[in-house]
Amino acid sequence: MATIDQSLDIEVSEEVIEKVSSPETLSIWGLAWPSIIANILFAAVGIVGLKAVGALGTEALAAVGTGQRIFFVIQSLIMAVSTGTTALIARAYGSGKKNEAAQVLFDSLWIGVILGLCTTFIVWIYGEDIIGLFGLNEQSKNLAIDYLKYSMLFSAMFSASFIFGAALRAAGDAKTPLVIMIFQNIINVFLLIGLVNGSFGLPNLGVLGAALAWGISFTIGTIIFLFLWLSKLTIIPFPNFNSFNTNRIKLILKIATPATIEQGIFQLGLLIYFWIISLYGTAPIAAYNIGINILMLSFMIGQGFSAAGATLTGQFLGADNPREAKKSGWKSTGLSIVSMTFIGLTIAIFSKEISGFLINDPEVIRLTVIFVWFLGSMQPLMAIEFALGGALRGAGDTKSPLIITMIGLVFFRLTVAFVFLYFDLPIEYIFSSLMIDYFVKAILFTYRFNSGRWVKKLA
C-alpha cells in the first residue's frame, strides 16, 4: 500500500523517516477515555448553560437553542476540514512521518480560520433573515439574533481549537486536548454564571452573556494550543514554512469535501426537523433543546470512541496493516454500544427529574421526557453510527458516510416527519420519526465497514 507521501508526491529520504509512534502502542480505550472525559465536560457545560439561561424563561431558552442550532450548522461545515486533518495525520504517524503531519496541521488551520471569518461576515449580514425562518415570537427572535451574531464572532477561534484537538488525537495524544478542555470549561462555567445572571461582580448580560462566555473560553483554549505548538511542547512539531505543497492542500480538501457535504446535509436536515418542531410552538422547541443537551453525555461518549476508531484505523492503514485497522473499528463499536446504551437508558429513566431541574414548565418537562425516551432508546444504533462512521472517515472514506446520512436522515426521518405533519399528528409523532433514521443508518454503516472496500482509500 502506498504511503501518504507517495500520494502527495513528496520526496522523503530514509534518514528523515522516524517512527515517532506506532499504532501497536495505542489502544481504543487509551485514546477514547481522554476524549470521552473532554466531551462529557463539554456536555456538562452545556447543561450549566441551560440552567443559567433557563432561569431567564422559556423564551430565552428557545432563543439560545435556536441560535445554537444554526451556529452548529455553520460550524459543522468548517469542522469537516478536520476530517481530512485526522485521516492524513493518522496515516502520517502510522508511517512515521511527523514532519508531514505538521504541514497538514498548519494547512488545515489556515483553511479553517478563513472559513470561520467568511461565515461570520455572512451571518452578520443575513442573521436576522435566517432566525426569522423559525417562527419565534418577537422576544425570542431578538434574543436568538443577538446570540447567533455574537457567537459567530468567535467562529475562527472555535475552528482552530477543534482542528488542533483533532490533529493531536490523530497523532496519538488525546491527553493534551483533555487538559486544555478542563481549563477551558472552568472558564466557561465561571463566565456563564457570571455573565448570564450578573454573578461574581460581572455585568448581567442575559442571553448575550451565554454567547460571550462560550466564545471567550474557546478563544483562550485556542491560544493555549497555539502557545504549546510554538513552544514545541506538542507531539506534532512546528512546520517548515518552505514546505508548501498544493497537492497536500488538494488532498485535505478532497477528503474534507464529502465530509463537508455530509455535515451540510446532516445539519440542514436537523434544521428542517427543528423547523417542523417549531411549528408546534415554543414548548416543543424548549423540550427538544433540553432533551438533546441532557443526552449529550451519551453522544460525547460515542464521539470519544469515534475519534479513537478514526485514529487507530488511519494509523494502522498508514502502517500497512489493514487487518488490525478493521479489528480496531469493530472493537471501538462494541465498546461504544455498551457505554452509550447504559448511559442513554440511565438518562431516560431520570429524564423527568433532570428536566425538572432545568426548567419549571410542566408541558416542557412532559415533552422532554417523551423525546428523551425516543432518542435514548436509539443509543445502541447511534453507537454504531459514531464508531463505524469514525473508522471510515479515519481511513479517508468520507463518501460512504455522506450517502448513508442522506439516505437515513433525508429519505427516512424527514419524509416520515412530513407525513405526520401533513396529517396534523401530535408532536410526539414527530419526535418518534427519528427512530427509523438511526435504524437504517446502523444497517448501512455495518454493511459498508464489513465490506472492507474502504481499505484502499488514499492508496
Image (spheres, grey):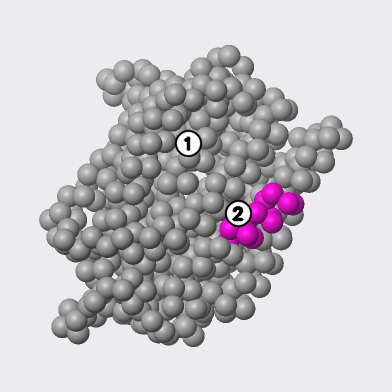
Where residue 81 appears, as percent x and y from the top left, is 41, 54
Q: For the magenta stretch, what is the residue range? A: 401-412
Residue 57: image quadrant is top right
Q: Residue at x 59, y 73 (%)?
A: 449
Q: Position of residue 430 (x, y in %)?
A: 75, 40
Q: Say which of marks 1 and 2 sits in front.
A: 1
The quarter holding residue 201 reads top left
> Which residue is pictured at 18% across the width and 54% down the height?
228
Instruction: Using residue 163 as the reference point, say whether residue 17 is left or right of it.
Output: left
Q: Quadrant of the C terminus?
A: bottom left
Q: Residue 403 colored magenta? A: yes
Which residue is denoted by mark 2 in the rendering? Answer: 344
The residue where tag 1 is placed is 71
**In the rendered view, does 205 fall on the left or right side of 135?**
left
Badge 2 amino acid: Gly
Q: Is residue 5 above or below residue 161?
A: below
* Residue 152, position as x, y percentages in the image: 40, 32
- Res 188 quadrant in image: top left
Q: Determine the residue positioned at 60% across, 54% down.
A: 344
As rendered, which of 252 and 179 lies closer to the eye?
252
